[in-house]
Image (tube, helix red, strand yellow):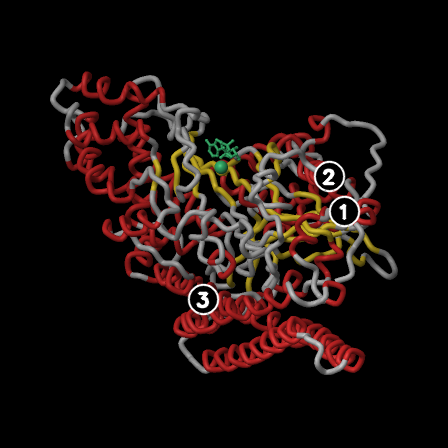
Amino acid sequence: MKKSNPTIAAERQYVIEKEKFVPVSQYFGEDTFNQAVIKEKLPKDVYKKLMQSINEDKALDAETANVVAHAMKEWAIEKGATHFAHWFQPMTGTTAEKHDAFADPNGPGTVIERFSGKQLVQGEPDASSFPSGGIRATFEARGYTAWDMSSPAFIKRNGISTTMCIPTAFISYTGEVLDKKTPLLRSLRAINKSAINMLKLLGAKNVKRVHVNLGAEQEYFLVDMDYYYKRQDLVLGGRTVVGAPPAKGQELEDQYFGSIKERISSFMHDVEEELYKLGIPAKTRHNEVAPSQYEIAPVYEEANIATDHNQMVMETLKYVAKKHRLAALLHEKPFARINGSGKHVNWSLSDDKGNNLLNPGKTPHDNIQFLVFLIATVRAVYKHSDILRATVASYGNDHRLGANEAPPAIISVFLGEQLTRILENIEKGTVAKATNAEIIDLGISSLSQVSKDYADRNRTSPFAFTGNKFEFRAVGSSQSIACPTFALNTMVAESIDELAEKIKARGTRNINQAVFEVLRSEIRLISPILFNGDNYTREWEAEAKKRGLPNEKNTPGALKALVTDKALSLFEKHEVFSNSELRSRYMIYVARYIKDLEIEVNCLNNICMSQVIPAAVVYQKDLAKAIIRTKEALGSAVVLSSQAELLKTILDLINSIYTTCKDIQARVETAKAIEDEQKKAETLCVKVKPKMDELREYVDALENLVDDEIWPLPKFWEMLFIC
Ligand code: ADP
Ligand code: MG
C-alpha cells in the first residue's frame, strides 16, 4: 500500500491551543447536574425531598419533579444546551439517546423553552427497533425510559451541538427489562439487603446502606484515522480479519509503561479534560503491553455511577480520537497475534460510612466480618462460575480469553499465599481448639498485614483478591461492566443469605463461634476454586478439569449457563430477572454472536474478493509478463526458476483463497438454515470460525509476497507503529 509518510502523520496532529491553564479542581464536574449544583439551584425543601428519594430509592412526586426539571432546564440552557435526551443502555452494546428540543411552540411563530417533570421522569422511545430477545413477541412493542436519579444528568457536546443527557433505565411497557442498567440497579438492591442483614447478624448497628464500588481499568488501541478508514474490517467489525504479523511485535517489551508519544499524550490530555468536566475521576494512564495499546483508569466509584462513567469513557475515547485524527479501537482483539484488550473490573463492598467490607481490619471483629464477606464472594464465584463466565462471553472476547495474555475461560480465584494459609488453618481446625478469643486472635490477627502491597501481583488469575477488593479480569474491553457486575452482585447476595442461614442455624448466642464453624466447613467446600498458580499453563487446564471447574472456550457454549435452572432461580429469587427476562437476554446474546460472526465473514469475503485477489492478480500478471519478456530477451533456455516458483505460489494462494471463501459461504448458508439459534451459533463457531482462520493464513502469506506498493490494505506495522 502507498505509505503515509510518518512526518505527514505528525503534521496532521491536532493542535491544542491552550489559552491558559485552569487547574482541574476548578472545572471538575462542571458539565454535570451534580449534588453541589442541585443544592445551589433547588429550594431547600425540594432539595431535601430529592435527596431523600435518591437515598431511599423512592419515586419522586410530580410537583417536586416539576421543580427539579425547571432547575435542570435553566442550568442546561446556561451551558448552551438546546436539547435534552434520555440516555440509556439498550442491549445493542452501546448507549442510546433520543433528543428533544427544549424549544416548544408557544402560539403562532413563537417558541418557549420548556421541560416538565413528566419529561424528566419518563420518556417513551419506540422499543421496537431495539433487541428484546422475544419479549416483544408476547408484549407490546412500546418501551419507556425512567429517570435514574442516582446518576447525575450531564452535558454532552458534539461538534457545535449541546445536549443535556439524563441517565435512564429502559423498560418495556409492561415493565420488563430491556437494558443493562435496570438489572444492575436491581442487583444493587439485592446485595444491599443481604449485606445489611448479614452485618446486623454480626452485630453491626445503624448500617443503612451497603454500596458496591467499581473501578474499571479500560484498555484500548489507537491507530491513525487514515489507516482505519482503509480497513473495512476495522470500521465495520472492530477487528482486522487479515494481516500478517509485523517484523517487530511486542517482544522487546518496550511499550508497557514506556514514555508516551507526544501525539498520544495530547490525546490523553484532551480525553481527561472532557472526563473531568463530566465529573469522571480519571486517574491513571499508561502505555499497555502491545504497540499502540493504552489504558485509562478512573478512581473507583459507586457501581451504578461507575458503570455510566465507563460508558462515557468509551464514548469520549472514540469522540476525542476523531478530533486527533486517530481511531480508538475498543475491540477485545483488534490484531491477531498481538495482545488484546480487556477491562479489569475492581469490585468491593462498603457501608454508608465508607468502611470497606473487604478490608482486613485491625480488630478480631473486623476480621470476622472481612472473612465472612470474603468467603461469601469466593463461595458465590465457585457456585456460579459458569454464570460469571457467561457474562463475559462475546464473539470479540473469544479471541482473547485463553490466549496467552488474558485469563483462561476457566474461572478460578486467587487469594495469595497468606490468606490461603489462614483459610487452610481455619479449615484444618488448627485454631479451633483454643478459646473463642484466642481462636480469633491466633487465626486471624495477622490479617491486618494483608495489605495491598502484600497481595500478590499474580496477573494471570481471572478473579483475584488484591488487598481490599476483587479484580475480575476476564471482562472484555468493549463490554458494559454492568453485566458481570449484576451477576456478581446477585450471586454474592445469594451466598451471603445462605451463609446467614447457616450461621443462624447454629444459634446466635455465641455468634463468633457460629460464624467460625460455618466458615470452616465452607472453606473445605469451596477449595477447588482457589488457585494461586499460573493460569496460562496447560497443567492448570488439566488440574482444573480434575477439580471439576467448567472450561467453556466459546461463547455459544458459555451462554448456556444463563438459562440453567440454577441461573433462572438465582436471578428470580433476588428479583433481578424474571425467567422470561433472563431467557430473552440469553436469546439476545446468542443472536448477537451470530451477527458478529456473520459481519466478519462478510468483511472477510469482501476483502478477499474485491481487494486481495485483484491485487494478487495484478502482481501475478506482472510476474508472468516478466517471465515471458525475459525469455524473449534472453532466449527460452534462460533459467527463471525462482520467478516461476513465486508465480506458482501466488497462483496457488489465490486459488486457496478463492476456494476457501466459497467454502465459508457454503458453510454459512448451511448454518443459516438451522432454526434453533443455539445450534446455529454452535455450528458457525465450529464449522466456520476455523475456516476463517485458515483463510487468513493464505491471505497473510500472500501479503508477504505481493508487491508492497499494490497491497490494498494498511499493514500491521503501519497501523501499530506509525502514529
Ligand atoms: P492495578 O490493578 O493496575 O494495580 P490499582 O490497584 O491501582 O491498579 O487499582 C485499579 C482500579 O481499582 C482503580 O480504578 C482503583 O480506583 C480501583 N480500586 C481501588 N480500590 C478499590 C476498591 N476498594 N473497590 C473497588 N475498586 C477499587
Ligand atoms: Mg488491575
Residue closest to the far right: 109
Q: Earlier in the sequence, mark 3 or mark 2?
A: 2
Which amino acid is tagged 2? Asp
Which amino acid is tagged 1? His
> What residue is pinned by disc 3?
590
Residue 130 image position (x, y, % from top left):
56, 65
Q: Residues within 10 Å of mark 3 (few under 14, many from 20)?
A: many
Which amino acid is tagged 3? Val
Residue 246 image position (x, y, % from top left):
62, 53
Q: Residues within 10 Å of mark 2 (few under 14, many from 20)?
A: some
Q: Examine the rendering and report whether any part of residue 486 can be seen.
A: yes
> What residue is pinned by disc 2?
270
- Residue 651 vertical position relative to residue 592 in the rendered view, above or below: below
Mark number, residue 208: none
* Label 2 – label 1 distance at C-alpha: 9 Å
> What residue is pinned by disc 1?
324
Q: Residues within 10 Å of mark 1 (few under 14, many from 20)?
A: many
